[in-house]
Image (cartoon, helix red, strand yellow):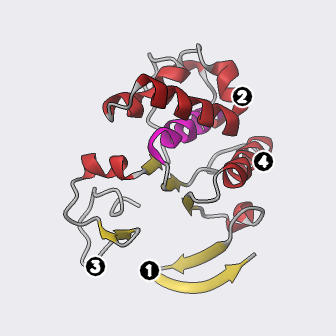
Amino acid sequence: VRTIMGFTEASGTVRLGGEDLGPIPPHRRPSLGLGYAPEDRRLFSAFTVEENILLPGRVAKLSADESRRRLDRAYSVLPELKELAKRPAGSVSGGQGKMVALGRALMLGTRLLILDEPFQGLAPVLAQRYAEALRRLRSQDKDITLLITESNPKLLETFADVTLTIERGELESRASH
């Protein structure tokens, strides 16, 4: 995940839609349609939930109309975020914070959405809601690719087309649903 985002060096080639990402600096990769939700969420606690979601669009200098369209997309995938919009991000639960991080990743993730351990630490009911949000996203946007690192692949069964298991750096199995 860190290599795709350009945070570490790779000896091979990472391509997105046939384009070599190697020469593209990390800060330019989101403009290619890459959204990233890190494992630790990395929310700005003094910002509201909505400000956290909008932040990548501001950094990418999206127009106000495009930012609103993408915010509406995030709210359609994660309707509970609209209810939390005005709350300080520092006041949301860990599970809600994972949802905010997903909403933020959706601001720029129009082609590839990378989710690093999104279910880690979630109570079963929140894990189910998160999975429902991902199913909603897949039904609304058939062209987006989700790359999810997850230590419990059972959580991906209801929406993953392909599951690859990597154990100690080796591709162990491949399954489709």
> Mark 3 sits on what residue?
12
Residue depth check, mark 2 versus mark 1: number of the one nearer the observer: 2
Q: Which comes before the other along the chain, label 3 or label 4?
A: 3
> At 45% across and 48% down in the image, what residue appears?
35
Q: Which comes before the other along the chain, label 2 or label 4?
A: 2
Q: Which comes before the other along the chain, label 2 or label 1?
A: 2
Q: Could you say where residue 148 lies in the image, as x and y percent from the top left?
A: 56, 60
Circles 3, 4 touching at the beta carbon (< 8 Å): no
Q: Majority secondary structure of the magenta segment?
A: helix
Instruction: Please provide the residue range marked out in magenta.
Output: 96-109
Element on which disc 2 rests: helix
> Mark 4 sits on what residue?
128
> At 58% across and 59% down in the image, what residue appears?
143
Q: Residues within 10 Å of mark 1 (few under 14, many from 20)?
A: few
> Mark 1 sits on what residue?
169
> Which image quadrant for residue 5?
bottom left
Circles 3, 2 touching at the beta carbon (< 8 Å): no
Amino acid residing under circle 4: Gln
User: What distance separates the C-alpha of mark 3 from that of mark 4?
Assistant: 36 Å
User: What distance separates the C-alpha of mark 2 from that of mark 4?
Assistant: 14 Å
> Mark 2 sits on what residue?
80
User: What distance separates the C-alpha of mark 1 from that of mark 3?
Assistant: 14 Å
User: What distance separates the C-alpha of mark 4 from that of mark 1?
Assistant: 29 Å
Q: Residues within 10 Å of mark 2 (few under 14, many from 20)?
A: some
Q: Which comes before the other along the chain, label 1 or label 3?
A: 3
**139 with respect to 113 (left or right):** right
Q: Is residue 88 above or below residue 171?
A: above
Q: Could you say where residue 114 lies in the image, as x and y percent from the top left?
A: 49, 55
Q: Is residue 90 above or below residue 141?
A: above
Amino acid residing under circle 3: Gly
Q: Nearer the viewer, residue 28 or 94?
A: 28
